[in-house]
Amino acid sequence: MDAPKTELWLLPGFMCDADLWRDQLTGLADIADCRVADFSSGNSISELAADVLSRAAPRVAVAGFSLGGYVAQDIVRQAPDRVERLALLDTSIRADTPERAAMKKAFAASAHLRGEFVGISDKVLETFVDHSRLDDLDLVDRIKAMTKRLGADVYLRQNGMVREDGEAVVKSLRCPVLVLCGENDVLTQMPEQKELAGMIEGARLVAIPGSGHMTPMEKPAEVTRALREWLAA
């Protein structure tokens, strides 16, 4: 009899839904029971984390991308014994800086909230993907469609969520940990990722060449491969 598959929770980022993980859902289906969290409701990161825990098995693997990385840290904060392995993709452990707070304010202004919500602006998109991919209409249209599907209310709630410092959480980890980031990510840059990985005993750091922030969509094969290796660790 085959061993039961690991239950893997894939946590999306800011204004992302299950389409973020489209390729990973297919590429990991043979080795993991994949579930994508729905972050379209909830008013805080701790609420999102508690909702995942209410739906998850007693022991799970958790992979959090961007905002989902903060939720993953809070899952560990709330229930450390339930996380058997953790992957942090293009995320941070730091509380919002004044500069980040200003960027979030600009994001909210870009939403065109007085008219029809059209998703993220082209200017914001430039911070999401590698500049070499800005003319990739399939990628760009998928990202814009995600943000438009989720809508203005989700945009404002997620944008306003307070990010707590997670250094103590990650330093307490004793499970297999993957830290992954696009080499050209301007939102969560490589020096920060190297510092993060250095805080965690045994953590593996994977840099994805030619990718910006949206690694699961920009470089799906590379991200899937790294997650497979992490699941097998």
Image (cartoon, helix red, strand yellow):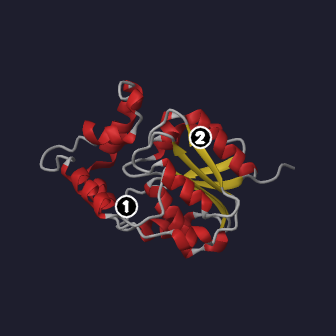
Q: Is residue 83 above or below residue 153?
A: below
Dot in front, 1 or 2: 2
**In this figure, which residue is indicated by the disc labeled 2?**
223
Q: Is residue 18 left or right of residue 140?
A: right
Identify residue for label 1. 41
Q: Position of residue 10 (x, y in %)?
A: 55, 52
- What mark, if any, has residue 230 been given in the picture? none
Query: Does residue 142 lie above or below 98 as drawn?
Result: above
Q: Residue furthest left?
A: 114
For residue 186, side relative to residue 226 (left or right): left
Give, as a three-letter code, the residue at label 2: Val
Residue 165, how many percent across, how many down? 45, 70
Badge 2 element? helix
Sequence-first tag of 1 and 2? 1
The residue closer to the viewer here, 2 or 182, is 182
Q: Quadrant of residue 95?
A: bottom left
Question: Is residue 28 shown to the viewer in this render?
Answer: no
